Image (cartoon, rainbow, N blue to C red):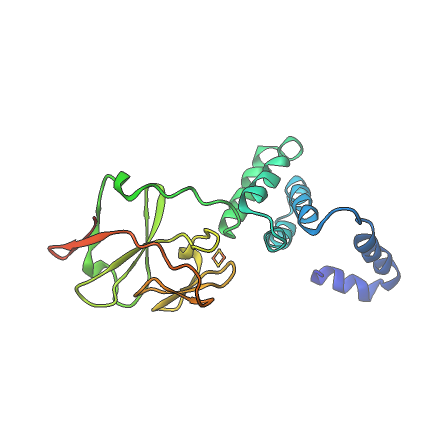
Amino acid sequence: MSKALTYLAKARPDAATHLLGFYKHSVQALDEKTRHLIQIVTKVTVGTERGLRQYAPKALKAGASREEILDAVLMAFPAAGLNKVLDAIDIMREMDLLPEIPDAAPAAVSDNLLGALEEFPLQRMHCLQRPGMNLIVFRAAPDTAKVYSARCPHSKANLCRGTDHGETVECRVHNWTFDLASGQCLEPAGGAGLQEIPSVVKDGRLHLA
Ligand code: FES
């Protein structure tokens, strides 16, 4: 319950009881995922950022895919208009709730040079954007580096927006955690590891292979 509703429940308990009762009992036939997707449509239509931030993660948690969340945002278009839809897309992208643009095959990258090794600090996650893909570079030792796709193997969130713990990164969507030296999934045990992108060090510079 929002802080404002909590306040109302104390300040005007009779009115709030009926209001909350309506929310709780009015919708009976729709499943949870459908209700949250429809909430996204209504929040985009009225242009409430707070409501979007509240209901869109609930839709994901209730089993909606990112494609379905994007569809819900677009369903609002006839009533909301383009500006509200674009504002909602900005918010949803910032929250990692929309589909990532698919990674291009590494071979399609025209400029294979990622940078001089010393540009990537030791034992720290470093994120790079390349056309069609986000990359993570990690140097466990002075002369080597590993390059990974930044797409979370669980459900494709951008790990560059996750929590950088130095030698590990934690996805902020469902908290899977990866060891950056090996790419292995640490939490949950047995989860899929990071996708390593072949790379090579030549003359102190890191290139995609
Ligand atoms: S998308 Fe689920 S843990 Fe990353």
Provide residue 67's location: percent of width, then percent of height.
54, 42
Residue farthest along the top direction in this orientation: 78
Residue farthest along the left direction in this orientation: 203
Give 186 or 162, whichever is nearer the viewer.
186
Provide residue 1's location: percent of width, then percent of height.
71, 61
Instruction: Report the number of numbered marks.
Output: 0
Quarter of the view holding residue 45: top right
Question: Relative to residue 114, is residue 162 drawn left or right?
Answer: right
Provide residue 64's location: percent of width, then percent of height.
60, 48
Residue shown at the point (45%, 68%) measured from the top left: 189
Q: Is 115 above or below relative to 76?
A: below
Residue shown at the point (45%, 51%) measured from the top left: 156
Residue shown at the point (84%, 57%) measured from the top left: 21
Residue shown at the point (36%, 41%) measured from the top left: 132
Give 60 or 182, whichever is nearer the viewer.
182
Residue farthest along the front direction in this orientation: 190
Give 6 or 170, whichever is nearer the viewer.
170
Provide residue 205's location: percent of width, then percent of height.
16, 54
